[in-house]
Image: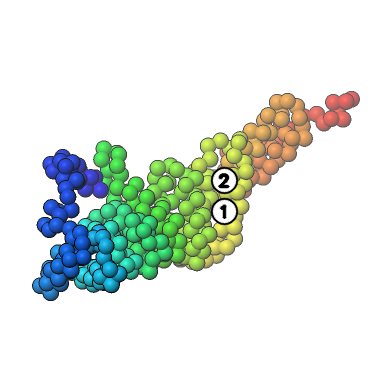
């Protein structure tokens, strides 16, 4: 994408802004028809060009006839029929492996029938992807979607978006740490999952987005995309791993056990659910189980330290009930982790809490 931007800048500087204001006739090499006689002559010349295989020039002549005024309705209908006929052949000519995607994109601006215009845009995107111009293909497909919502080529467009986005997402190129190609991939994949939720490779897109956000330590986004996979693609073979990553990313996003106990409890429930469902399974579940148990131990240890922090607070202010409650819960959680140091610390906290006087003892 960067190279393409630099090319466009260089082109603008070299040609000058005046080139964008040239009269239509000087661009296509003939004067625009302005009346009925001109149009009939232009259509006859267009037919000759078309018969000789000069489809681009034939289409230019026919399109130029649209702006003529005072035409009878049958002649205006003839103009539109010729535009459609020449455009269809032009699309065919440009759709080969050596076709020009920019010329196909230009056809979108000709007010062609919906099916023809969509076909031109999607084929242009295919050619751009074949040339490794993935981001340009994405922009072209976005243009098609904007002009023709819910078009008939959506299945193919979704496949192309997945191909382009996943390829760019795996590209490690960056410009001194900025303008990362993988960021372009993430943009495409986000567009895909929002606008093409039924595309069969959306599950791959959700996984890749989770990984990209995790690489940037954007843990909440990473977790949300894994949750989206489970919500929208629950039958995907990738759902098993996504289910394990949701609590993992939740834990990674927590900074203070004292203030995130609700999130810790959510992670604990998610981890216990995963283990209940999949602990006895073989294959990928067996491979994932170790990492899930590591996260579970980490979660329990954080819960224990959260309870220890609260128990120490109640011990300092002499509130026996709260101190005992949280110290004993911390001890139970510590035992579950198997961490002997944490068990020792929690046992000491529980002993201190139990040694505090009760309310009745204070009154005496």
> Which class describes the residues within 10 Å of circle 1: few (<14), some (14-19), or many (20+)?
many
Is residue 26 positioned above or below 232 on the image?
A: above
Is 21 located above or below residue 27 in the figure?
Answer: above
* Residue carrying label 2: 299
List x then y, in percent, for residue 235.
50, 67
| Residue identified by numbered label 1 | 271
Q: Position of residue 351 (x, y in %)?
A: 71, 34
**Residue shown at 68% from the left, 33% from the top:** 311
Q: Residue at x 29, y 47 (%)?
A: 181
The residue lying at 70 percent from left, 38 percent from top is 326
- Horizontal side, residue 139 vs residue 322: left or right: left
State which quadrant residue 333 falls in. top right
Q: Residue 72, image x and y in percent? A: 28, 68
Foreground residue among 273 and 15? 15
Please report contact status of discs 1 and 2: CB closer than 8 Å, yes or no: yes
Tell me, for residue 74, which label it has, or none.
none
Q: Exactly how many numbered labels are in the figure? A: 2
Q: Quadrant of residue 44?
A: bottom left
Q: How is the image coloured?
A: rainbow
- The residue sitting at the right extreme is 364
**CA gap, disc 1 to disc 2?**
9 Å
Q: Nearer the viewer, residue 261 or 172?
A: 172
Give the camera-side residue of 219 and 100.
Answer: 100
The answer to whether residue 217 shows anywhere in this view is yes
Q: Earlier in the sequence, mark 1 or mark 2?
A: 1
At x 17% / y 66%, what residue is drawn? 37
Q: Secondary structure at mark 2?
A: helix
């Amino acid at each position: 994408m960067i190279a393409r931007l630099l090319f466009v800048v260089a082109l603008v500087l070299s040609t000058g802004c005046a080139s964008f204001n040239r009269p239509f006739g000087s661009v296509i090499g003939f004067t625009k028809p302005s009346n009925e006689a001109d149009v009939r002559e232009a259509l006859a010349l267009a037919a000759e060009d078309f018969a000789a295989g000069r489809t681009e020039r034939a289409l230019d002549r026919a399109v130029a006839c649209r702006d003529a005024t005072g035409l009878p309705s049958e002649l205006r209908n003839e103009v539109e029929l010729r535009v459609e006929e020449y455009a269809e052949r032009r699309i065919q000519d440009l759709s080969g492996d050596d076709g020009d995607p920019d010329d196909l994109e230009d056809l979108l601006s000709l007010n062609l029938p919906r099916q023809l215009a969509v076909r031109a845009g999607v084929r242009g995107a295919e050619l751009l992807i074949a040339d490794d111009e993935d981001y340009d293909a994405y922009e072209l497909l976005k243009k098609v979607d904007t002009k023709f919502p819910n078009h008939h080529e959506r299945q193919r467009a979704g496949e192309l978006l997945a191909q382009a986005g996943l390829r760019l997402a795996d590209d490690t190129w960056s410009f001194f740490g900025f303008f990362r190609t993988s960021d372009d991939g993430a943009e495409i994949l986000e567009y895909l999952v929002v606008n093409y939720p039924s595309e069969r490779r959306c599950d791959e897109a959700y996984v890749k987005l989770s990984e990209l956000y995790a690489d940037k330590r954007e843990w909440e986004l990473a977790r949300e995309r894994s949750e989206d996979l489970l919500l929208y693609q629950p039958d995907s073979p990738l759902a098993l791993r996504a289910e394990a990553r949701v609590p993992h990313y939740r834990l990674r996003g927590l900074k203070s056990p004292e203030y995130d106990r609700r999130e810790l409890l959510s992670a604990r429930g998610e981890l216990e659910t995963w283990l209940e469902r999949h602990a006895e399974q073989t294959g990928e579940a067996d491979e994932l189980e170790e990492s899930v148990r590591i996260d579970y131990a980490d979660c329990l240890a954080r819960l224990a330290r959260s309870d220890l922090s609260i128990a120490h607070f109640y011990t300092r202010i002499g509130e026996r009930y709260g101190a005992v409650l949280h110290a004993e819960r911390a001890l139970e959680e510590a035992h579950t982790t198997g961490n002997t140091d944490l068990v020792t610390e929690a046992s000491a906290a529980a002993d201190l809490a139990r040694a505090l006087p009760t309310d009745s003892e204070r009154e005496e």
